[in-house]
């Protein structure tokens, strides 16, 4: 990968050297801020959609089963685009793809507010998934490029911004409901906000040229296996994350027997710690190294899930879910950072390979948990996923690329 020297024309000598350093630091900070705003825009769009699901369900008179089937259109769209995202980003550049894809993502969101029946909502979600995946690969490619400019790990902070946008989207959603604004109006306001963020920041995206030197076929395949291993680690992490999103509330209601007002406590504690962990995770990685942090993270995930199983009471279960959030917080950002630095595969395509395998964990984990829970109980299913954390720690120790 070769970066354009964005301030290389400024030749600093003698008494101007300090001014040069200040200008460089200021411009690097502006690049990081710009990329962060694209992460924020993506997280805001996703959270905005999630905040309106109950209203859309009621407006379209959908049953739980119908809604569940329709919601599957979103990951199907994402999986469909995974075959093309990496190649598009490599061919046209993430600095061109990202401004376009995030606008399409935002305005695809507004289509959901116009849906009058189930099939229109399903089609809208499919399109949203397509542009969501394209934006995801493009923004993480920019994240890898920006991290390369800073010469230190900063990827977790970008994902922390995404999580922060999730909280913001939920709060804005509550405000929109309080103001009794319609779904389409709500979505349109968010789309316009994302448009403003796009216009203000797109010119600061990094223009990078991919330089890929393919090795001999045998060597190339050997190196390529490392991406699969990273993907498997991501699969385990995102499966753990997925059950928190979909099953934490059910666990608190049916197993912990929490009062109705506290059913959301498990999910909230998980989300708070996941977001917090992403903001201070970079500092830990820079101090202790990726391998040690990821090994500890895997153990923390397992410890949290097993604690919730062994002590199904409000206080210990809440603390346990906080552990799970802390454990998963840095794994996916770290995997994306490692994949993006693959020596023989373009950044966009490497990210696609890892995210494709990882995303299967998020997609397949929750329904598998449901079937296991039906056969053996929800506590057993949480214990089953708890094994994944130890597996992450074991796998990390076997990959030499992780330091």
Image (cartoon, helix red, strand yellow):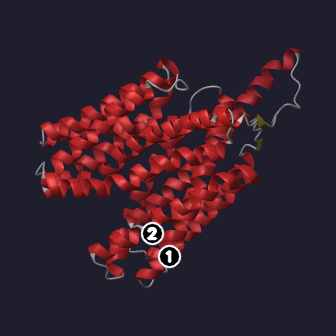
Q: On screen, 154 above or below 175?
A: above
Q: Quadrant of residue 173?
A: bottom left
Q: Quadrant of the N terminus?
A: top right
Residue 352: x and y in percent read 58, 49
* Residue linked to disc 2: 73
Residue 232: x and y in percent read 44, 40
* Residue linked to disc 1: 123
Q: Nearer the viewer, residue 228 or 354?
A: 228
Horizontal placement of 156 versus 192: left or right? left
Q: On screen, 220 above or below 103?
A: above
Residue 168: x and y in percent read 44, 53
Horizontal placement of 228 versus 4: left or right? left
Q: Dots 1 and 2: beta carbons under 8 Å?
A: yes
Mark 1 to mark 2 CA distance (whole Å)? 7 Å
Horizontal placement of 246 versus 72: left or right? left
Q: In which quarter of the image is residue 28?
A: top right
Residue under the image location 82 percent in, 33 percent down: 7
**Could you tell me if residue 361 is visible in this image?**
yes
Residue under the image location 12 percent in, 50 percent down: 255
Would you call the spot at circle 2 few (<14 residues within 10 Å), some (14-19), or many (20 or more)? Answer: many
- Judged from this view, the residue extending furthest toward the bottom is 116
Q: Nearer the viewer, residue 91 or 319?
A: 91
């Amino acid at each position: 990968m070769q970066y354009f020297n964005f301030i290389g024309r400024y030749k600093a000598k003698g008494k101007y050297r300090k001014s040069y350093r200040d200008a460089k630091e200021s411009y690097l900070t502006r690049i990081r801020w710009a990329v962060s705003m694209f992460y924020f825009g993506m997280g805001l769009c996703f959270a905005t959609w999630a905040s309106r699901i109950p209203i859309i369900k009621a407006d379209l008179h959908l049953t739980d089963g119908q809604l569940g089937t329709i919601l599957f259109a979103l990951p199907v769209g994402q999986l469909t685009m995974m075959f093309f995202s990496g190649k598009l980003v490599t061919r046209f550049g993430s600095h061109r793809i990202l401004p376009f894809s995030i606008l399409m993502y935002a305005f695809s969101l507004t289509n959901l507010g116009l849906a009058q029946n189930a099939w229109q909502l399903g089609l809208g979600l499919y399109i949203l998934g397509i542009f969501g995946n394209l934006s995801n690969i493009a923004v993480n490619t920019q994240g890898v490029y920006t991290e390369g400019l800073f010469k230190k790990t900063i990827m977790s902070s970008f994902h922390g911004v995404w999580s922060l946008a999730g909280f913001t989207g939920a709060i804005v959603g509550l405000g929109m409901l309080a103001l009794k604004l319609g779904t389409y109006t709500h979505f349109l306001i968010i789309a316009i906000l994302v448009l403003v963020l796009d216009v203000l920041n797109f010119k600061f995206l990094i223009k990078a040229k991919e330089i890929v030197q393919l090795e001999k076929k045998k060597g190339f395949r050997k190196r390529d296996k490392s991406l699969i291993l990273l993907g498997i680690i991501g699969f385990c992490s995102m499966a753990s994350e997925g059950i928190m999103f979909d099953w934490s509330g059910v666990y608190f209601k049916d197993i912990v027997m929490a009062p109705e007002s506290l059913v959301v406590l498990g999910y909230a504690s998980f989300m708070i710690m996941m977001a917090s962990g992403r903001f201070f995770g970079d500092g830990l990685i820079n101090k202790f190294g990726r391998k040690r942090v990821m090994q500890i993270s895997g153990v923390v995930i397992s410890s949290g899930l097993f604690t919730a199983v062994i002590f199904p009471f409000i206080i210990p279960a809440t603390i346990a879910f906080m552990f799970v959030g802390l454990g998963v917080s840095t794994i996916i950002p770290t995997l994306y950072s490692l994949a993006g630095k693959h020596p023989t595969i373009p950044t966009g395509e490497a990210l696609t390979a890892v995210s494709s395998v990882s995303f299967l964990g998020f997609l397949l984990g929750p329904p598998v948990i449901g079937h296991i829970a039906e056969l053996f109980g929800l506590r057993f299913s949480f214990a089953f996923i708890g094994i994944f954390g130890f597996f992450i720690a074991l796998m990390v120790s076997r990959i030499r690329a992780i330091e």
